[in-house]
């Protein structure tokens, strides 16, 4: 069950759904304007959020896309407000416009290696009883490196950050609230042959993210916002893995042993998975 949560005086968000891969949708409201973050994974998802906003008397003025993956853009058809996005997000949407999304087309693309089973399965679940004539209107405003949107006393700093997960990933920082929407940028590259992280990209990304003075972090598929302390732990773990995969030359057992020694405890399933992603992305 998705619910609208109030994070602060100026920020609300709709909780994610794991099964159908619905990401968090956010809205930042200043004295004069509201910026919505992401369009959602279907027209129903976008409408649900916009209906919830209406109940709170919040009227969206702009929408920004964090990146072009299906679960963040398939709701675009239901969006009335002008849409902002990074230039590569725009060209990726142009490519998505050419595809069809019925089961046969999805299965063929999974077989051909151009779509991944994880996304195809989630699309089938989200659209199990809905027609799949996905209409993707193109965004209205494009930026390359980023832009700042003044909402009246509240600012949204949008920055293109990239990373392994998606080259067009953008983050949205609200300095007055010390809140950072990270989209999916901290997740692995799922479109590689094996899901992977590369040390170089992760280390660069973390350095960029740590420049922001934030107390609350929102990851699009995480069930709740993360605190500074939680993210500091996560950043440290990711950095350690990124460094160990190089010093251990991609040797899974050696990395796991070294990480266990550093943490002074057994590794969690998540940590073992993260090590695996770094090993998959290790090229020597
Ligand atoms: Zn994504």
Image (cartoon, grey):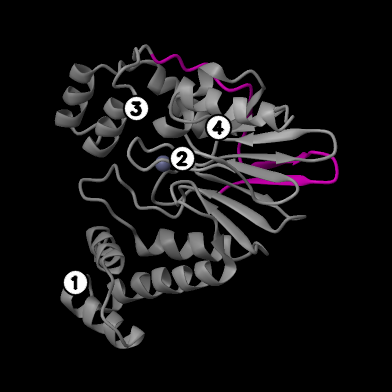
Q: Is residue 115 visible?
A: no
Query: Earlier along the polypeptide chain: callout 3 or callout 2?
Result: 2
Query: Earlier along the polypeptide chain: callout 1 or callout 3?
Result: 3
Residue shown at the point (74%, 46%) measured from the top left: 10
Q: Give the Cα separation between the discs numbered 4 and 2.
A: 21 Å
Residue shown at the point (36%, 15%) measured from the top left: 98
Which is closer to the viewer, label 3 or label 4? Answer: 3
Which residue, given by chain and number where applicable, does mark 1 sit on?
252
* Mark 2: secondary structure: loop
Which is closer to the viewer, label 1 or label 4? Answer: 1
User: Is the residue under label 2 in contact with that under label 1 (CB below 8 Å)?
Assistant: no
Residue shown at the point (79%, 33%) measured from the top left: 33
Is the C-beta of the residue carrying label 2 under 8 Å from the nearest atom of ligand 1? yes
Q: Give the Cα separation between the discs numbered 3 and 2.
A: 12 Å
Q: Nearer the viewer, residue 245 or 26?
A: 26
Tally of marks? 4
| Quadrant of res 270 | bottom left
Which residue, given by chain and number where applicable, does mark 4 sit on?
87
Which residue, given by chain and number where applicable, does mark 2 sit on?
23
Which is closer to the viewer, label 1 or label 3? Answer: 3
* Mark 3: secondary structure: helix
Q: Position of residue 180 (x, y in %)?
A: 62, 54
Magenta span covers which residues? 134-160
Query: Earlier along the polypeptide chain: callout 3 or callout 4?
Result: 4
Q: Is residue 178 visible?
A: yes
Q: Position of residue 106 (x, y in %)?
A: 23, 23
Which residue, given by chain and number where applicable, does mark 3 sit on?
126
């Amino acid at each position: 069950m998705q619910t609208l949560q109030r994070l602060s005086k100026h920020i609300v968000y709709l909780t994610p759904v794991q099964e159908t891969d619905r990401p968090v949708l956010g809205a930042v409201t200043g004295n004069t304007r509201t910026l919505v973050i992401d369009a959602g994974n279907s027209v129903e998802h976008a409408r649900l959020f916009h209906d919830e906003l209406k109940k709170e008397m919040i009227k969206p003025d702009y929408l920004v896309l964090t990146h072009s993956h299906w679960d963040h853009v398939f709701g675009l058809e239901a969006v009335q407000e002008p849409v902002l996005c990074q230039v590569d997000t725009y060209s990726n949407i142009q490519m998505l416009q050419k595809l069809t999304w019925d089961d046969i087309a999805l299965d063929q693309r999974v077989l051909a290696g151009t779509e991944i089973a994880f996304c195809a399965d989630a699309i089938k679940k989200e659209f199990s009883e809905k027609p799949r004539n996905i209409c993707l209107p193109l965004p209205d405003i494009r930026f390359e490196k980023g832009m700042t949107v003044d909402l009246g006393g509240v600012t949204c700093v949008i920055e293109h950050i990239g990373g392994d997960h998606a080259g067009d990933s953008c983050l949205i920082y609200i300095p007055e609230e010390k809140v950072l929407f990270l989209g999916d940028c901290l997740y692995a590259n799922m479109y590689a042959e094996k899901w992977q992280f590369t040390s170089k990209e992760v280390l660069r990304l973390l350095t960029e993210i740590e420049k922001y003075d934030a107390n609350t972090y929102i990851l699009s598929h995480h069930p709740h916002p993360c605190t500074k302390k939680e993210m500091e732990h996560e950043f440290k773990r990711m950095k350690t893995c990124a460094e160990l995969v190089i010093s251990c030359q991609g040797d899974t057992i050696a990395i796991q042993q070294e990480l266990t020694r550093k943490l002074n405890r057994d590794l969690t399933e998540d940590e073992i998975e993260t090590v695996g992603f770094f090993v998959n992305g290790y090229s020597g």
